[in-house]
Image (tube, rainbow, N blue to C red):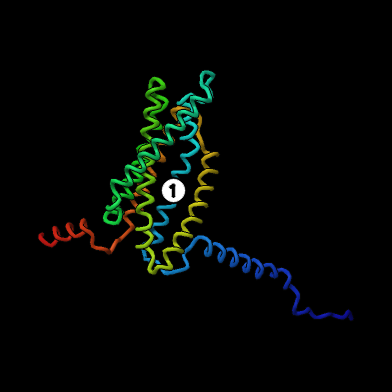
């Protein structure tokens, strides 16, 4: 009679050998993701909702970068045989000068108001950026180079206002979301990593999704601008400040009188 050899206990273990390795790899990737992008210190409950909408609005902004840059440069004559390098350099210098001067003016005008109205200034920053985006859409349809240059300078001033307001209220928002002083530094570091990831993703998608034609480009920017405004509103709405400022005290007194 043929001799039957019993099966070894190790038989079939090779088929499942890859599963523990896969689990370990997933755990390592998850740990690296959490260490790079998620806070390691306690935060307030609204942090994740705020950060979700904040990242999505930043993605909308970077999706417009490629399209807006091309639209502005073409409207100002870049690529035209009549354009010159000296004229382009002069225009760029004027744009930078307008940005710096307006930034100094806005910073000096509202220096004492940032902590009192962080939500208002955050919305003001994003709405000024959205207004500049809508003006960029109108550039190809404006008659004459002089009108386009004036609108471009106005867009530069609006974006300078956006940068000053957003940069001023960001520490106020982070100090509110963090529950400790160490947590503020951690949130700043994680926000930088998140912004880098969103920037790379937005620029890559912007290159792939950039439409052709002035009408299609303007419609693309207009749609992204509307989405950007809505996501910013949702991000600001998620914040629940607990400090009693002058504005909140007035609202509380109105409610008390009622």
Dot 1: element: helix
Q: Position of residue 92 (x, y in %)?
A: 46, 32
Residue at 30% x, 56% y: name it.
115
Residue 205 vertical placement versus 16 (above, below): above
| Above-or-below relation of 105 to 244 | above
Q: Would you place residue 139 above or below residue 244 in this image? A: above
Residue 114 % position (x, y): 30, 53
In the rendered image, which quarter contains the C terminus? Answer: bottom left
In screen coordinates, is 12 left or right of 69? right
Q: Residue furthest right?
A: 1
Q: Quadrant of the N terminus?
A: bottom right
Count of labels shown? 1
* Quarter of image, res 14: bottom right
Residue shown at 53% from the left, 25% from the top = 85
**Residue 107 x/y as whole percent:** 33, 47
Structural crowding at the residue carrying mark 1, measured as other residues with C-alpha within 10 Å and reported as few (<14), some (14–19) or many (≥20)? some
Q: Nearer the viewer, residue 15 or 165?
A: 165
Residue that carries the numbered disc 1 in the rendered image:
58
Q: Quadrant of residue 159?
A: top left
Q: Is residue 119 left or right of residue 87?
A: left
Residue farthest to the top, as pictured: 82
Looking at the image, residue 87 sits to the left or right of residue 147; the answer is right
Dividing the picture into quadrants, the one containing residue 152 is top left
Residue shown at 46% from the left, 47% from the top: 59
96 in relation to 46, above or below: above
Q: Residue at x 45, y 59 (%)?
A: 188
Of 48 and 136, the residue lying toward us: 136
Residues 243 and 210: in front is 243
């Amino acid at each position: 009679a043929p001799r039957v050899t019993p099966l070894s206990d190790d038989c079939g273990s090779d088929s499942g050998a890859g599963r523990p390795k896969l689990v370990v790899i997933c755990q390592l990737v998850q740990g690296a993701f959490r260490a790079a992008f998620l806070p390691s210190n306690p935060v307030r409950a609204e942090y994740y909702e705020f950060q979700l909408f904040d990242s999505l609005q930043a993605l909308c902004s970077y999706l417009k970068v490629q399209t807006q840059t091309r639209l502005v440069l073409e409207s100002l004559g870049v690529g035209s045989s009549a354009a010159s390098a000296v004229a382009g350099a002069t225009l760029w210098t004027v744009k930078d000068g307008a940005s710096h001067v307006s930034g100094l003016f806005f910073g000096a005008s509202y220096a004492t108001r940032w902590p009192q109205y962080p939500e208002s200034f955050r919305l003001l920053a994003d709405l000024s950026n959205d207004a500049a985006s809508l003006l960029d859409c109108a550039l190809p349809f404006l008659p004459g180079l002089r009108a386009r240059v004036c609108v471009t300078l106005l867009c530069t001033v609006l974006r300078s206002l956006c940068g000053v307001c957003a940069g001023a209220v960001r520490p106020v928002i982070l100090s509110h979301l963090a529950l400790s002083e160490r947590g503020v530094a951690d949130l700043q570091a994680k926000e930088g990593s998140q912004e880098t990831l969103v920037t790379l993703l937005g620029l890559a998608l912007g290159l792939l999704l950039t439409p052709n034609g002035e009408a299609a480009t303007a419609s693309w920017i207009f749609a992204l601008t509307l989405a950007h405004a809505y996501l910013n509103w949702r991000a600001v709405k998620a914040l629940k400040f607990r400090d009693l400022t002058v504005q909140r005290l007035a609202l509380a007194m109105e409610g008390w009188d009622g």
